[in-house]
Image (cartoon, rainbow, N blue to C red):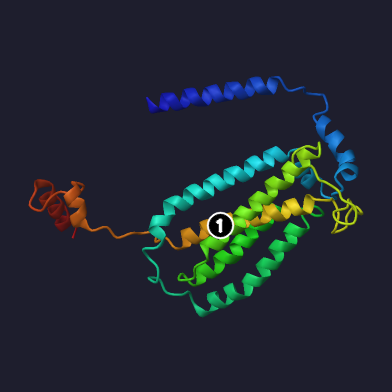
Amino acid sequence: MRNVTALLFTGGLAFLLFVLLMQLPFGDSPRLLADGIIPASPAEVGAANIVTSVVLAYRGMDTLGELSILFAAAAGAGLILRNRSEKHHGREKNASFLVTRAADLMFPLLLIVGFYIIFHGHLTPGGGFQGGVILAVAFFLPMLARPDTRIEHGLVSLIEGLAGGTFIMIGLWAMLQDKAFLQPLFYEHVLEKGELGALFSAGTLPLLYIAVGLKVGSELAGLLASVAATDPIEVIDKSSLRDEGSLPAEGSLLAEGSKHNNGEQG
């Protein structure tokens, strides 16, 4: 029955994809939207990286949804791991000397690379999401090398909240100025459009990527800290399982049969 259900689902999905493909305008240009964005982006947004213009300026609501999904996933995983993370504090030994020294050397380098990618997101490939992941890894490596290392979850939550609030406030401020959500704003002598390709350009766009990078980095750092503090294998007392009925009681036929089988294997 399971195979029949899987076959029906696969066949239905294939038929749906076939119908959608048949409706595509083959032979016509599929770049109608791109043909409008690519030439207009440098003048309208002032960012040399076209992808950044699309992610933040032209589809800002989608980016807000992506951040919301990441927050929900990190929060859910954190709630699951929270009760287990504090039970095993101080039980594991540090890694070897080579691993700990390598983690100490990589920590500042990863911070520099992460912030560089965030600050240059409107100029070169990368941005807040990629740089935020690198920042999270920078804090995760010392926890792998020294399992007793902990991060301050209160500070991480504060950074995450401030970054997310800044992101939303900039988007709402743009809407109050009769602009689209997250559309870059330009202010003379402060947040100018600047010269295309310059570090200080694209108005409020770099501020948005800084907020995204800090939010992504803090969320993933907190999640990875919970994972690092969780023992993957928990020893369960057999007596508690017998009390719950998960294991056969001593002297029962199942228990005697298990002992008999183990004796034959020996």
Most foreground residue, 216 or 21: 216
* Residue at the image position 78 percent from the left and 54 percent from the top: 206
Residue at the spot of label 1: 157
Please tell me whether mark 1 sits on a helix, a strand or a loop: helix
Asked if one can make out residue 129 in the rendered structure from this viewpoint, the answer is no
Q: Where is residue 162, by image quadrant?
A: bottom right
Could you say where residue 4 lies in the image, as x and y percent from the top left? Answer: 42, 24
Give the position of the C terminus as an image quadrant.
Answer: bottom left
Q: Is residue 214 above or below residue 4?
A: below
Q: Which is nearer the eye, 4 or 65?
A: 65
Residue at the image point whose x is 66% and y is 22% from the top = 20
Estimate the x, y position of residue 90 in percent, counting from the top left.
39, 71
**Quarter of the figure with the N terminus:** top left
Q: Residue at coordinates 61% horizontally, 58% vertically from top-left?
A: 159
Q: Residue furthest bottom?
A: 97
Q: Nearer the viewer, residue 115 or 152?
A: 152
Q: Indicate whether 91 appears above or below 223.
A: below
- Looking at numbered disc 1 in the image, what kind of residue is underneath it? Ser
